[in-house]
Image: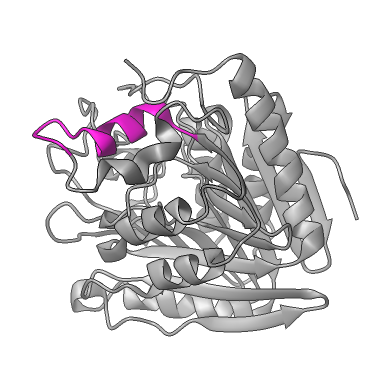
Amino acid sequence: MAQDIGSLTHGATTFYFQSKRAGVDGLPSKHLVDFIQAAKKSLDVAIYDLKEPSVLQALLDVVNAGKVKVRIRYDATTGSKITGVSKTVDPKPPTTHAVKAAGLGGVAEPISDKGRHLMHNKFIIRDGKAVWSGSGNFTIGGLHLQDNNYFVIESAKAAAAYQQIFDGLKQMSHGPAIKPSSLTLGDVKITIFSSTQAKEIEGIETEVVKALKGAKTVRIMAMLISDPGILQALFDLKKQDIKGVLDPHEMKQVMKPPKGKSHVDPKLFWFANGDPRFVAALSHAFSQNDQNDFMHNKVMIINNKTVVTGSYNFSENAETNDENLVIIESPAIAAAYTRYFDALFKQYKAHGLPLPPK
């Protein structure tokens, strides 16, 4: 079992951690390319944003080899708030151009959600036997510049659970909601959750709140926290051993939106108003050229034995995105995430931005 900060292999699971600022490099782009190139029969890709050159090339090579069935479903959002000039959210110029320019138009299809909601998944199913997922998009920012974590699960049962999510993207309104799926791999228990655009559901939020209830130790790495239920659960734990790493610009937006104050009780943002147990990344608000360097993780480590991670931001809007999330019960895996957290916390305590930024 490898135990460096950048990666961990534990039984049928492998984890990669990334933070250019903190000097943590699990080489996610290399491992993602290797994962793609190892396909024998099929690759089903559900991805919010796909622009990283080596990943595009790896997918094209597999398609051109003609032995593997490749299907790519990506977010087709083109709304004014999700573009290269956005200053309020993770900017994403439309992916279609990059996919077509790479020669992948024939195996890719756009997925359009209603309103401001997103097809925000980030996973690949390989040969019905393995899954790649995590918090990072397949972009230069996501794989090289941001703080992100990724994982591989070698399990047909896990692959089948993600296959349900992938297949559901073709259904009208992306529904119905898919029930959680649990599996045990050696001494690791994994529960796979998804949210859907079919209707607003509280399933993931409820599970996160449930996992937090009565916790003695909590470590958080989050792009933002704005879901009222999760905020309340953290407020109830403010006297416990709790620490966090956040993206300052995204927190500023949810605390003080451009068109008025947040509807959330200000006291629930206690952690982002000078509490020394929370630090903020030295990131930038946005970039128009895929150089985005957000603190992009969506992670909670609870009681040194439970890890919550995936594509799901801890926001109310995420409840009506297409998302995936896992809750992993394993002290060994929690320890690896804690080592990663400690590296980020040390970096941003010394070289970070205030919360919220001015």
| Up/down of 262 relative to 304, above or below | above
Magenta segment:
246-261
Whether residue 270 is visible here, answered yes or no, is yes
Q: Residue furthest right?
A: 1
Q: Position of residue 185 (x, y in %)?
A: 76, 77
Q: Nearer the viewer, residue 270 or 181?
A: 270
Q: Position of residue 4 (x, y in %)?
A: 85, 40
Number of dots carrying numbers: 0
Quadrant containing the C terminus in the rendered view: top left
Q: Quadrant of residue 151?
A: bottom right
Q: Nearer the viewer, residue 45 or 272?
A: 272
Q: Residue furthest front?
A: 239
Q: Position of residue 315 (x, y in %)?
A: 33, 53
| Up/down of 345 relative to 309, above or below | above
Is 254 one of the magenta-colored residues?
yes
| Up/down of 164 relative to 64, above or below | below
Quadrant containing the N terminus in the rendered view: bottom right
Q: Nearer the viewer, residue 176 or 93?
A: 176
Left or right? Give the position of 266 relative to 191: left
- What colour-coding does the image apply? one colour
Q: Quadrant of residue 129?
A: bottom right
| Up/down of 198 relative to 273, above or below | below
Residue sitting at x 41%, y 44%: 50
Left or right? Give the position of 202 relative to 338: left
Whether residue 26 is visible here, answered yes or no, is no
Left or right? Give the position of 139 relative to 42: left
Residue sitting at x 45%, y 65%: 324
Residue sitting at x 27%, y 41%: 266
Q: Position of residue 156 (x, y in %)?
A: 65, 81
Q: Residue furthest left?
A: 259
Q: Nearer the viewer, residue 99 or 26?
A: 26
